[in-house]
Amino acid sequence: MNNLQTPGNPKPAEDFSDEELLRVAQLTRLGLEEGEKEELISTLRRIIGFVQVLQQLDTGGVEPMVHPLDLVLPLRADEVTETDVRADAQACAPDVVDGLYRVPKVIE
Amino acid sequence: MIDFSLCGLRRALDAGDIGSVELTQACLDRIEERNSELNAFLTVCGETALDEARRADAGRAGGGPLAGIPIAHKDIFCTRGVRTTAGSRILDNFVPPYDATVVERLAQAGALLIGKTNMDEFAMGSSNETSYAGPVRNPWNLSRSPGGSSGGSAAAVAAGLVPAATGTDTGGSVRQPAALCGLTGFRPSYGRVSRYGMIAFASSLDQAGSITRTAEDAAMLLDSMAGHDPRDSTSAERDGEDYSGPLQGLKGKALKGVRVGIVKEFMDEGLEARCRQVFLDNMETLRGLGAVVTEVSLPRLPLSVPVYYVVAPAECSSNLSRFDGVRFGLREAGADSLDELYTRTRRAGFGEEVRRRILVGGWVLSKGYFDAYYLQAQRVRRLLAADFTKAFETVDLLAGPTAPAPAFGIGEKIDDPIQMYLNDVYTIGASLAGIPAISIPAGTVDGLPVGLQLMGRPFAETDVLRAAHAYQLETDWHRLWPPGASAPVGEA
Amino acid sequence: MEFDVVIGLEIHVQLATRSKMFSGASTVFGASPNTQACLVDLGFPGTLPVANREAVAMAARFGLATGGEIARRSVFARKNYFYPDLPKGYQISQFELPIVSGGSVEVAVPGTPPRQIELTRAHLEEDAGKSLHDAMPNATGVDLNRAGAPLLEIVTEPQLRSPEEASACMRGIHQLVTWIGISDGAMQEGSLRCDANISLRKPGDAELGTRTEIKNLNSFRFVERALHSEILRQADVLRQGGTIAQETRLYDSGLDTTRPMRDKEQANDYRYFPDPDLPPLALEPGFLEDLRGTLPELPQERRARFRSDYGLPAEDARRLCESRAAADYFEAAGKACGDMQLAARWTSGELAAALNRDGLDIADSRVSAGDLGVLLSRLRDGSLSGKLGKEVFQAMWAGEGSADDIIKERGLRQISDAGALEGVIDEVMAEHAEQVRQYREGNTRVFGFLVGQVMRATRGQANPQIVNELLRKRL
């Protein structure tokens, strides 16, 4: 499966640095722990190196394929079809007070 | 003698050879007996299933095509009042107040929900080892993986715990476990089955499918599952069709004149030699059924894995942001600030592979990389889809193996994500193009099942199902049971 | 002024749909917390968005009304960030391909000639919920009733030159969106909110200075005051040789100052990408043609017509076009009485005063345009005097009936019949022979006294013009 595995032993992506890891971890709110950073970064570098093969392809003029089907957006009539589901929905919630979802104090 | 397939059980129930309670109880007994070793079910709904079975036996349940037949849902489909975890700790306590459209439609067709099956966490994996609830074991060999991500559904059907189960296929998650467990795994065209209520992994790739014993059973489920859903804006504006009907009365040279293209790019040294031989034998069988088998090339196919591992993580990084500990699911205690609430909850709630994909996805969408990674991947995806379109100008179906080798050992690949990703190379192409594809049992290697994959044009489900059914009329691979397993009912 | 001010606005208009942008939940304001947030609004796993046709139509109406270009194909994208009032962790918005590009609005600071301000774009998006920071001790409460409400975000070019012009721009947009019926414009409910970008530069500088963005300005007055205070702050920094940090700030109306938001991600990376749950929005030409047909005459056009057709002064035309309801009222009253100028005077005089006194919108006026028209007709045909007209109006306002009923009941009909008046005049002259004598001897000042006596004898109903004429003749 040589041609399929061409990207299989990629050069790890050098542009994925420690700072990048911390930046993305903050954007995605994934709490990282000190002990895991090193291994994580080396794995992510390999994954990113693996997908970098795509950049060798000339895709000039090609429209990105965001949707597999050539659909247009369906539009629904402006009607109220939903009823109050607060009781059911909040039965799933970890912390509710007086119908409000409670979270730690946010300071703007 | 009762044939433990959906079609067989329909006949047996209608003939009065068996009752729904008896059938359901037999399945529950098997689950009780085998689940602790297989870990296929995360939740079993014994009482409610039996209640429904009693109603079906009393004739009060309406006469849908699946009336009285127990099935299992992959734990990615939301089920009203029944815990739905997506194999993740973050949803460990989640009991949705709503049904997925698939669940609703199958219930309307009379199917009884017997339980929810294990899966890779958020469907991210090909071995069922990323599940928070632990790996599923392959009934053919308990030290092997059943494949994934719909591994619980595959193991449950393979071991005869249930006649059929739903699955979802993002990059092969129905087809690959079906192949590794000796079953029929069908992924319809993107948009054919509603995604509403199916917990999203990668929205432009996710598609509901089925894991059954036969192609006829896949058609029978699709009869009820398919069709436009106004709650899903990507659901195709087509009515579901009759998929079972066109399979009736096939015989003899059932594939006469059907042009089958062997995907050239699949046939290289990455394919295990004995699997290759099985595949070549399969092609002879198709020729024997009248098919015209040639070779076609999809030159961009080798790029499908990298494309997928940009697009799917990008979409998942966004789809999984809603798991934030505020409105549902896990909230990790002890957070003093909002940021801490998010990071503690998401750290505790998500497993390693999910976290990796969220990070990769967040990165490929971020400033400075979006164009070079995300958009570029989607451009290559279009070129790849064009390869499929072009191939379908000369053939009616594409054929290839479903996996490079039979079931691999649990723990064998999990430490190397890239090796795991490469395992998906046979199935990802159809996912990216959104076309229907099926994996059917096609032989064994070392006593383990091997699958044959057939792919069709967009919305040509019937072409795919007919070919698969014709193959199954000619062969017996789909009738094999794993060692020590058997149908829970009807054995003499 | 030492610095030139450059301001651009981003105005969020809540569209007046019944249901939300992507779900069938109600948008009615003021419900109990979280009772109008359905599973889609709450971002429950597996739920999916379905777009509201009416919201799309409203956005397109705005594009038609401002002369913008309406995209045949536009794209919904996800704007990714974490916040407790953003349930999915992303907001569905439009980024690269908005539904409306370009266009302009007329902005008039009172007392200066109007200017056209160009719009960059207008796009559709869903609103977030509300974070309530004072609802519970040491915690924030989240109400998601508003989550998913349809918004049109209107972005102006940085062409506004003063806080006054910025607030006039916001007023202009408020007027327009209510005029074309796409928003209720209820400021107190947050139906129109504004973020303002502002920078200073030395006169003559070609490059724009570094800007700050002031978030969440929800009244015309706050826009003006916040920008004034930010101008002072930026000018101070620049004068002392400092540099302006590009940042997001909040206006504290109590302290009348702006301060930086305590957001760790000042330079947020929203990772926009096309929403895979929503195919591209494609508008068929027929859809736009139908909308064009339903678009009302716009404020600018109407003002111009009031001036040219009815000869109204610019200021009157502007006032009467402050809302479509006022303009409609005026035109209906004018047509009913046949005198547009008279209707204009009454609409912006007596009627406006009464509305103002009772705190009512013209749409809720206690006197309908048609009824006012009848009253004005009585003034025109001479059957009611101007002074009694006001009395009748007040009685109508108090709900005593139609103009004609009140005139009849109170016996207020003006007497213009010479025969009837001559009799009265004879009596008055007989009674006041002394004054008649004085007049005839040249003391014309007593004329007014005699007219007064006639008016008194007729309880004010006599037509004073005719009384004048007849009396002069008799004397």
Image (cartoon, coloured by chain):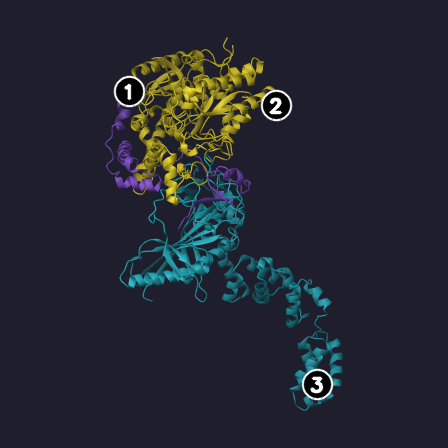
Chain colours: A purple, B yellow, C cyan
What residue is drawn where x is 34% and y is 31%? B353
Q: For the residue labelled by badge 2, is the local secondary structure a helix, a strand or a loop?
A: loop
Q: Mark 3 lies on which chain?
A: C
C-alpha span from label 1 to label 2: 56 Å
Q: Label 2 sits on what residue type?
A: Arg
Q: Label 1 sits on what residue type?
A: Asp
Vertical side of C390 occupied by C449: above or below: below
Vertical side of C55 occupied by A6: above or below: above
Q: For the residue labelled by badge 3, is the local secondary structure a helix, a strand or a loop?
A: loop
Judging by the rendered image, the residue that carries numbered circle 1 is: B268
Q: Which chain carries label 1?
A: B
Pointers 2 and 3 in contact (C-beta within 8 Å): no
Q: Mark 2 lies on which chain?
A: B
Classify residue B8 as left or right of residue B315. Answer: right
Q: For the residue labelled by badge 1, is the local secondary structure a helix, a strand or a loop?
A: loop
Locate residue C67, reporting x and y percent: 44, 52
Q: Do labels 2 and 3 share a chain?
A: no
Between tags 1 and 2, which lies in front?
Answer: 2
Quarter of the image with the C terminus of chain C in it: bottom right
Between tags 3 and 1, which lies in front?
Answer: 1
Judging by the rendered image, the residue that carries numbered circle 2 is: B60
Judging by the rendered image, the residue that carries numbered circle 3 is: C475
User: Is residue B448 or residue B244 the one in the foreground?
Assistant: B448
Locate residue B261, reporting x and y percent: 36, 20
